[in-house]
Amino acid sequence: METSFNRAGVKPAGYKGEGCVGCGMCFYNCPEPYAIRVEKD
């Protein structure tokens, strides 16, 4: 989780550049519509 709040007043998940498996949990839990796009190669 990030340390700062976003416009919705929640601490969003932050991507650190490793370990993403493309599960989509960040997409479905993000309070900001269309803020995240998950793509698999």
Image (cartoon, rainbow, N blue to C red):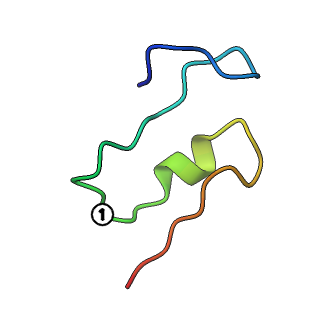
Percent x, y of residue 35: 68, 49
| 32 over 35 or under it: above or below | above
Query: Which of the two residues, 6 or 26, is positioned nearer the viewer here?
Result: 6
Q: Residue at x 71, y 35 (%)?
A: 31
Q: Residue at the bottom extreme?
A: 41
Q: Residue at x 74, y 40 (%)?
A: 32
Q: Left or right: where does residue 40 sit relative to residue 26?
A: left
Percent x, y of residue 25: 48, 50
| 4 over 28 or under it: above or below | above
Q: Quadrant of the N terminus?
A: top left
Q: Amino acid at mark 1?
A: Val
Quarter of the figure with residue 30: top right
Residue identifier under label 1: 21
Q: Residues within 10 Å of mark 1 (few under 14, many from 20)?
A: few
Q: Left or right: where does residue 8 sit relative to residue 21?
A: right
Percent x, y of residue 5: 60, 15
